[in-house]
Amino acid sequence: MKFIFCFLLLSLTIFNLAAKGLKPVYLRCEYKENPVTDAAAPRLSWELTSAENGQLQTGYQILAASSESKLTESLADLWNSQKVNGRATSQVEYAGKPLLSRQICFWKVRSWDKNGTPGEWSSTAKWEMGLLDKKQWIADWIGLDLDNLGKGKTYHLPPAPYLRKTINIKPGFVKARLYVTALGLYEFSINGKKTGDDFLTPGWTDYDKRVYYQTYDVTSQIKAGANALASQLSYGWYAGYLGYSLLVGNPVVRTFYGKVPLLKAQLEVEYVGGKIETFATSGQWKASVGALLESDLLNGETYDARKEFSGWNIAGFKDQEWQNVQVYPDKADRQIQVYPGPPVKVTQTLAVKNTIARPEGSYIFDMGQNFAGIIRLKVKGSAGDTIRLRFGEKLHPDGRLMTENLRMARATDTYILKGDAKGEMWEPKFTYHGFQYVEIKGLKEKPSESTLTGLVIGSDTPKVGSFETDNKMINQLYSNIDWTQRANYVDIPTDCPQRDERVGWTGDAQVYVKSATFNRDVASFFTKWVVDLNDGQYENGAYPLYAPRPNLRKTDTFSPGWMEAGIICPYQVYRSYGDTRMISQGWPYMVAFMDFLEKRGKGNGVFKEKSFEDIDPKGGFGDWLSFGKKTPPDMLASFYYTYCADLMAEMAGAIGNVKDQEKFTSTAAKVRKAILEHYTDASGRFVCDSAAYGNGAGYVDGQLGFTGNTQTAYANAIYMNILSKPDQRKAGLYLTELLEKNGGKLATGFLGAKPLLPALSSTGHSDAAYKLFLSKEFPSWGFEVENGSTTIWERWDSFTKEDGFKYNAAMNSFSHYAFGAVCEWMFGNAAGIQASKPGFAEFDIRPEIAPDDLGDGGIKHLKASYHSINGTILSEWQKQADKLVLKISVPVNTVANVYVPGKMSDQLLVDGKKIGSSAFVKLKGEQAGYVILEVGSGSYSIENKR
Ligand code: RAM
């Protein structure tokens, strides 16, 4: 009894100690859990939990070892960081022994809390090093040239090759890794089982400069004796159709990087004792044409199941009839690296919502959600029965599938049955579509709900945001934003998933990047894409219109508002995740871009009218898809110049480059001054010399004329801090005036819509921002929701009651995330979550409460959470009859300034008690209708009277 009592006491004390300390969880390396990386000094991060409020880390210690058993202070053979003082829990660089290719590093961490007490060690995590030297790749590029078998009139779609080899593995192996990549797309299997569950590997890059590879732990997939290595290849971005090249009559419409898809793979088998045997792609492999008759990313797949070879991917298959593969030379300066982004995967499956019978035995399936992905087909029938699947985002009023907005993307999959009496199942491997509706032709029996399943694909970016209110329309809008992001963050940030475009448009990416960070963890996604951007930079320093940058149209070059993505995206990654590596690695590119601007500005500091008349369209895209008179693109270019110089100054500071910090600070001041001199009048309104643009020919919507006095001009000037404080306020008034004159409606395009609501809020017009946000009238976000959208449209008028889908054949996507950039305001203003220090180590919660006079169309209750790199932040507010209740969460090791609507004299309550009763909630002061509290970690409920 006594013993039990002692034991209980002991465990209680241990529990108590543990409960008091900090516990590191969610250990990651290069933003991933247990990844393979080729970063020389991988960056580590963890999050902290604690049972106490107001907790901070005062120090940490990391151990890294070559085996889990050596992960102790005395044995750690790779690294013992010793105690490092400070609050850092992310971007912590490994600084132990140099790491070798293939090395597995086990690691753990512990943290000291604010009282200097060390907590428990975390559980063990690991990372593995990839192949650090290109010479370690002994595998050849192999393929089979089937190009001459492409027969179509409009689409040249050759069959996709099958490759295989049987190998012999000796007994006594302990570990096996497959390193694999392709020029094109690959799917690899060992003994009939696919390696990994990634889709569209190895991703899109400028293949002349670099190609990424995947590493799979295949130890459990191999066996002693005969093993089959097998791979299917497809054309993908490397050799398939890309963008609108076909539509615009570009001389090249496919094979932008090469004609024949190629595979490079090596299986490394390690035996007891450490000896490694490598089985690599070589001229010894066999290849054949098979069932995959057509395979193209945009145009779809055709699969003839009658041509399947059974057992081709397992040992024992007789491949004597198959051809020898062809071996292709490598490009000496092509880099081969570990895929740095989150893999593209099937992230969700969707069941059919509704089946509609159509004339002539065809059917349309409604998946209930517009998404990017493929379908899994289950059918029964006779050999040779042909099922044709077409995909669309909308139906015509008469019930037909609407495909005009796909333009030249054929987006058609065909399955030819083999006639298996048990039924057959198929899903395409190397294509995807943007759709909500699927039209099926050729079914011999009435379909059931299980005939089709939707497989949602996208870069597997962890969900970090949630946004919920008591207003249904807003909840749907948030869902639409997230779905549109998922549909377009597919290896790169595409503009749209459905039509013949789907490229990494830089303007869309830069206006939306901050919004994206609130929904999904996009740190490694942008780590990948920013390299694409840098690879795509022009010799003159301009970042391109889209990255990667195949030559889709001769006149495609760069545009103000688009090219700045090269500065804005790394900046946002720095602000959201505290990442300075992207800045230092990209610095030469970013500086080259700033030099380009300097040269273009001819020392004026401002881009006067017609500064960009040499590009196509003249002036660039400007405030693309706006309504009414155009904001001069050169004025916007000048704003962006200032903005980029500001960001560069801040980023230079972040990497300790004082010289450049000073340089860009003075550039920003110079351009600001020149803008005001050139583009404002005495009253501080924006003006321009519209006559300079003549009749506007060659400019986007130039015939509408130009004026500086637009919503977009003021919204951007306020957002980008172009004006002095008093002038900011004036600009806010001008902006509201313009809105009123326009019947309370927005007129902004891609560049104007993002800053519109933030600019209203920051100049004291939160009510006006809410009116736009909650409006259901055309044009507005709510209008789209009211009209049944499940994603964000490309244009405000993608559909109107009067004109239907009038832009269909031209340009009319229903899944375009750019206008979803309102998300930045939703989290940053409505919920009020704003980072004041990079990585949300310190942040504000400054909610803007929706006005009361909106009745049922308003918001009484809003709850948003954001899982930052430091942990989960919650901001919830609820208007009750006589009081406002805020619920907030501040992650361990962070500090928040919480702005509670009200006055000092209000006597607000925290967890039911007066301020002052908690050591972690301190009164800091009062500002513009808010009481400011400094709050340490923990969850709190704050009440104030209304
Ligand atoms: C469209 C794209 C993209 C936009 C460019 C200017 O075709 O879809 O969204 O950035 O044009």
Image (cartoon, rainbow, N blue to C red):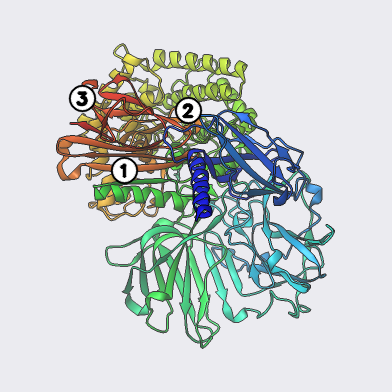
Report the amino acid beneath label 3.
Asp
Instruction: Choose the circle earlier in sequence order: 3 or 1.
Output: 1
Q: Is mark 2 within 8 Å of ligand 1?
A: no
- Which label sits on residue 837? 2
Q: Report if the CB atoms under discs 2 and 1 are less than 8 Å apart.
A: no
Q: Is mark 3 within 8 Å of ligand 1?
A: no
Relative placement, left or right, of 852 versus 750 is left
The amino acid beneath tag 2 is: Lys
**Residue assigned mark 3:** 906
The amino acid pointed to by label 1 is Lys
- SS for dot 2: loop
Distance in Å between CA atoms under marks 3 and 1: 24 Å
Q: Position of residue 9 (x, y in %)?
A: 49, 47
Which image quarter has ligand 1?
A: top left
Would residue 45 be visible to someone looking at this image?
yes
Percent across and percent down for residue 351 are 39, 68
For mark 1, does the 10 Å Cα neighbourhood hold few (<14), some (14 to 19), or many (20 or more) residues? many
**Secondary structure under the numbered disc 3 in the rendered image:** helix
User: Looking at the image, is mark 2 or mark 3 earlier in the sequence?
Assistant: 2
List the residue tagged with mark 1. Answer: 863
Say which of marks 2 and 3 sits in front. Answer: 3
Q: Position of residue 908 (x, y in %)?
A: 24, 28
Query: Measuring 57% from the left and 24% from the top, which residue is drawn there?
Result: 654
Q: Residue 889 in the image: x percent, y percent? A: 38, 38
- Position of the C terminus, as image quadrant, is top left
Q: CA distance from mark 2 to mark 3?
A: 29 Å
Q: Toward the viewer: 785 or 898?
A: 898
